[in-house]
Image (cartoon, helix red, strand yellow):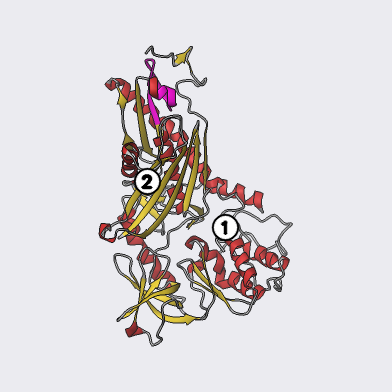
């Protein structure tokens, strides 16, 4: 198949320049029943995250006597995209993403404050358009903060990559499918630790180094939006409504 | 980042001589007020709980925690049954977070409301001011546990008490709340003598901020004068006992925070917060 032209006159398919993000909208505290929650609309992605806990670890023999266990479940809804997602629930891909998201949060969540318990994060991809794992991670970070789970740092995620020989930030679905490389990354805010990095496709060392720099820069923008969302959640009237 | 210098404050962590928040919160002077918090029991905390299990050596108590609290029958004369509501004090917390409870008494049938633990100080108010307003306004008797459980009972206007607590939780980050609650109660058919006691200092505000005049009955002395407030909000409800709980709590918290290799989760900018408060007043 012939490769489609993803960049024309320095503009991408949706008119963005290489360093532009898709429009990102983050809202915290959207679910009433969850302890903390967030909705992230990132381009065509719609991701909901809900946090419960710390609460009793189930099964009990799985409890860690020194720290809380972080349990993350990423699932895609059957209707989330044009591809085949016939049944929701764990599959090979979502198990992998759950794992990498968990490993991204394990260094920042201060889990030793809650021994023998578990913290659950449920992430539902309602609509997908490329880059759901970074959108999910961003949503999960906001939901954890909204739940009051102590964290040493905030995590922001962004994908970078290469399309038509050009390094770009925040790849959409077509760019991901037809581009040369896709590198989802998650970066902590304060000390810029990289807590998630995966790579699909090929990049040279130099390109990767440059990509990482761009990702760190772009994650700052995502962080701003996350912080903003948390502040805004206190303006909402229905904030903190109880179940009575 | 909260402060450039090293501070020993609960819910923060020190990295390289700078203090960072670990949870979402606000800064006022030298205090960090968490807006979202997961409750961790501390000795001296007053708690409301539900008896979930009667065992040989005592009672398991549901406390809104990952694991149940425990009342040893050695230290209590009262005997409880499964499903009883109790009000007690945390005596000891072991290293995995199990809480031993003493001084437990049985509460009569009532309603238990679950509120976020971070809002409890607001529901109690300075020296129980808020609580007294609610008690006055609704005629209910109320016990507030630091664990976020609130027991409401008695002959008063129960639905109104619930609504009021809901109102407080929804507006917990604003200031001048006691007056607003009094107003709210009067609007909804409670009867409160408009607060005779001296003004409550809103704990969440930067002190430089004055309150817009329209709403409060007596706005004159409301702002400023924020005396270097002792952390009295955390104080238990039950009138007489322990005023001494405060200091020991502090020490309990700090070593934990210090051992973390931690830093900032949120720097919820105070500046932003100010803006919000003004708009919504």
**The C terminus of chain B is located in which quarter?**
bottom right
Measured along the vertical axis of the image, is residue A160 above or below residue B184? above
- Extreme-front residue of the structure: A86
Q: Secondary structure at mark 2?
A: strand
Q: Is residue A229 left or right of residue A74?
A: right
Q: Which residue is mark 1?
A: A241
Q: CA distance from mark 2 to mark 1?
A: 26 Å
How would you rate the neighbour count of disc 2 (Cα within 10 Å): few for under 14, some for 14-19, many for 20 or more? some
- Taking the spot 45% from the left edge, 38% from the top edge, the residue there is A223
- Extreme-bottom residue of the structure: B77
**Could you tell me residue B273's position as x and y percent?**
57, 49
Residue A165 painted magenta: yes
Q: Which residues are magenta?
A: A159-176
**Could you tell me residue B74's position as x and y percent?**
32, 85
Q: Is residue A214 left or right of residue B163?
A: left
- Residues flagged by tags 2 and 1 on a common chain: yes
> Which of the numbered marks, if any, corresponds to residue A73?
2
Task: Work out whether mark 2 precedes mark 1 in sequence or the reverse, and give the earlier one.
Answer: 2
Quarter residue B225 falls in: bottom right
**Could you tell me residue A55's position as x and y percent?**
37, 60
Chain designation of label 2: A
Measured along the vertical axis of the image, is residue A180 above or below residue B242? above
Q: Is residue B7 visible in this depiction of the protein? A: no
Q: Is residue B66 visible in this depiction of the protein? A: yes
Quarter residue B256 falls in: bottom left
Q: Secondary structure at mark 1?
A: loop
> Which of the numbered marks, if any, corresponds to residue B27?
none
Mark in the foreground, 2 or 1: 2
Q: Nearer the viewer, residue B129 or B190?
A: B190
């Amino acid at each position: 198949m012939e490769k489609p032209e993803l960049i024309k006159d320095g503009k991408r398919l949706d008119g963005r320049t290489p360093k532009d993000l898709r429009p990102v909208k983050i809202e915290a505290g959207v679910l009433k029943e969850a302890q903390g929650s967030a909705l992230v609309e990132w381009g065509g992605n719609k991701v909901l995250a809900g946090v419960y806990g710390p609460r009793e670890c189930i099964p009990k023999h799985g409890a860690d006597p020194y720290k809380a266990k972080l349990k993350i479940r990423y699932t895609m809804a059957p209707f989330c995209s044009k591809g085949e997602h016939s049944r929701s629930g764990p599959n090979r891909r979502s198990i992998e993403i759950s794992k990498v998201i968990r490993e991204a949060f394990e260094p920042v969540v201060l889990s030793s404050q809650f021994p023998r318990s578990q913290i659950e994060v449920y992430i539902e991809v309602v609509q997908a358009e490329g880059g759901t794992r970074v959108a999910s991670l961003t949503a999960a970070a906001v939901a954890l903060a909204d739940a009051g789970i102590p964290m040493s740092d905030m995590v922001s995620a962004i994908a970078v990559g290469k399309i038509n020989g050009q390094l770009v930030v925040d790849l959409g679905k077509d760019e991901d499918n037809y581009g040369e490389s896709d590198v989802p990354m998650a970066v902590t805010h304060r000390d810029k630790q990289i807590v998630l990095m995966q790579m699909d496709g090929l990049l040279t060392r130099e390109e990767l180094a440059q990509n990482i720099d761009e990702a760190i820069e772009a994650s700052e923008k995502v962080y701003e939006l996350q912080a903003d969302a948390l502040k805004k959640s206190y303006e909402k009237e229905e904030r903190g409504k109880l179940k009575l | 980042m909260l402060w450039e210098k090293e501070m020993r404050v609960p819910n923060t962590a020190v990295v390289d001589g700078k203090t960072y928040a670990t949870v979402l919160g606000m800064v006022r002077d030298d205090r960090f007020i968490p807006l979202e918090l997961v409750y961790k029991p501390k000795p001296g905390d007053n708690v409301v709980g539900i008896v979930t299990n009667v065992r040989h050596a005592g009672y398991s108590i549901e406390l809104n925690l990952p694991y149940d609290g425990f009342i040893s029958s050695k230290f209590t004369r009262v005997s409880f049954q499964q499903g009883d509501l109790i009000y007690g004090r945390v005596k000891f917390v072991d290293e995995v977070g199990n809480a031993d409870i003493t001084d437990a008494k049985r509460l009569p049938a009532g309603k238990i409301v679950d509120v976020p633990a971070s809002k409890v100080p607001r529901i109690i108010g300075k020296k129980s001011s808020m609580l007294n307003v609610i008690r006055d306004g609704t005629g209910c008797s109320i016990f507030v546990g630091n664990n976020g459980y609130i027991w409401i009972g008695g002959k008063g206007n129960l639905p109104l008490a619930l609504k009021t607590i809901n109102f407080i939780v929804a507006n917990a980050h604003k200031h001048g709340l006691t007056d607003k609650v009094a107003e709210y109660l009067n609007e909804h058919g409670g009867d409160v003598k408009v607060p005779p006691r001296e003004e409550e200092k809103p704990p969440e505000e930067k002190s430089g901020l004055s309150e817009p005049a329209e709403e409060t009955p007596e706005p004159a002395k409301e702002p400023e004068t924020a005396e270097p407030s002792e952390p009295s909000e955390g104080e238990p409800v039950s009138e007489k006992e322990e005023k001494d709980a405060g200091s020991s709590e502090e020490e309990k918290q700090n070593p934990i925070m210090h051992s973390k290799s931690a830093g900032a989760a949120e720097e919820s900018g105070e500046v932003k917060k100010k803006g919000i408060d003004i708009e919504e007043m």
